[in-house]
Image: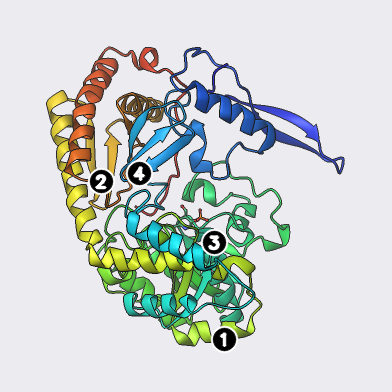
Amino acid sequence: MGLTQPNIELHTANAFGQSRPFHVTRLESKYPVSRVPKSQALYSRALQLIPGGTQLVSRRPSRYAAGVSPAYFARAKGARFWDVDGHEYIDWVSGIGAIILGYCDEVVDDAVREQISRGTMTSVNHELEIELAEELCRTISCAEMVRYAKCGGEACAVAVRIARGVTGRDKILFCGYHGWHDWYLAANLAEEASLNAHLFPGIEPIGVPAALKGTAIPFPYGDLTTLATLLDDHRGEVAAIIMEPLRSELPPEGYLAGVRKLCDERGVVLIFDEVSSGFRTRLGGVQELVGVTPDMAVFAKAISNGYPMAAVVGKRAVMEPSGRMFISSTYWSDTIGLRAALTTIQELRRRNVPAQLEKVGNEIIRRMNEVAAKTGLPVKCGGLPTHPLLAFQTDNPATKAKLTTLYIQEMAKRGCHGYAAFYLNAAQSSAEVEQTAAAAQEVFGLMKVGLDSNRLDELLECEPAQDAFRRLVR
Ligand SMILES: Cc1ncc(COP(=O)(O)O)c(C=O)c1O
């Protein structure tokens, strides 16, 4: 039984008698031979028990080369993981951005193990909560006070609640991806389903209260005029602008300073969502890189090298009033996340990790472009050194999807797990870059032949990967 998953639509009555279309996954394939049968068997089991199969959309096999690339790992170390079928991979996705030092980093893991032996939590607080807050305030320019959470989306929801509470306004203007919570998906209650053009199509705001319609409004990255117009249209109603300050390219000159100015003029709280960008370009985040200080910022993922942890940091004037708001959860102060985050930040500083990521990222960009030139495949590697991107040069979206999937498929066969973007971590070195460039030499060559002879379909051993997050924030 294969793992490729054409969606079929069923109309099913739920327990409340409402009939709704449900997308389910059919486990049949025109590609009978699997390279990863154990991964497939596990995913089939998961689909019986776990709606949607995985907890994170980005871990669905359909995002990669389903049936060829791995879906389940057995163990990981440094820059690599081993799948349940026994294959070894360099992981160029770095735990979807949660890994920055490398898998099973000995310093962080030893610190966590020691902390576990002293107790992960009790009925009272632990000093680590204050120590980490002090470290964050030393490291991040907007940080004067700190709250914690466990994941990025949750921390964004906390930041939005604080901004609404402190301004007494309801509306949020946003740019980028900010998680799964109601405040954000409310954008798709609008007739034109705002997230379709903004992020990726097809997110139905099922279960999001209709009453939230009109409370979350996207704005395009890099366009100050449209943002100013939106602020005028909703004058006196906007609590916050929350945005990814960058993703894989530098912002246009003066853009973030312009956003800052608009917020100052209108009394709007500016929140940088640094869940994916944080700690990678600079220890103090993108705000240090571009010299623009928001009122609040959200960090998660890389903050703790794979242990659940997130932080909402901000200026005292915005954060202090939140002491009166009901924002409270049992596990936000567990000592594992606190210890992991504190140790990770100290190690990032000690090992000067942002500079190392930049060096390895520049090597990737250079080597992939060399390989592209040698093989003649129309592909360019660009983006920020800390987040390189492969762009296949075709105007045909179907061809682009096939090329991307073929790349994922053939690189997986050669021990490189990833997609067309690279998330770096400090365990990756020139050795990983060279192994990847050698694999790409063969893969790009094969793709070029497939493209020139119009035989991409024959080379594909799976359905084209479903569109990864399409972000306006580059
Ligand atoms: C910028 C940004 N914000 C929020 C999130 C949500 O984080 P999490 O998946 O930890 O809830 C992500 C995850 O990719 C992200 O990239």
Residue 268 seen anywhere in this rendered image of the structure: no
State yes or no: discs 1 and 3 in contact (Cβ < 8 Å). no
- Mark 4 crowd level (few <14, some 14–19, many ≥20, 10 Å Cα): some
Mark 4–mark 1 distance (CA, rounded to whole Å): 43 Å
- Label 1 SS: helix
Of callouts 2 and 1, the N-terminal one: 1
Q: Which residue is mark 2?
A: 428
- Label 4 SS: strand
State yes or no: discs 2 and 3 in contact (Cβ < 8 Å). no
Screen quadrant of the N terminus: top right
Mark 2–mark 4 distance (CA, rounded to whole Å): 11 Å
The answer to whether the residue bearing label 4 lies less than 8 angstroms from the nearest atom of ligand 1 is no
**Front position among marks 2 and 3:** 2
Q: Which residue is mark 4?
A: 77
Up-down relation of residue 327 to residue 210 (above or below): below
Of callouts 3 and 4, the N-terminal one: 4
Q: Which residue is mark 3?
A: 217
Of callouts 2 and 4, the N-terminal one: 4
Please, what is the three-letter code of the amino acid marked with disc 4?
A: Lys
Mark 3–mark 4 distance (CA, rounded to whole Å): 41 Å
Please, what is the three-letter code of the amino acid marked with disc 1?
A: Pro
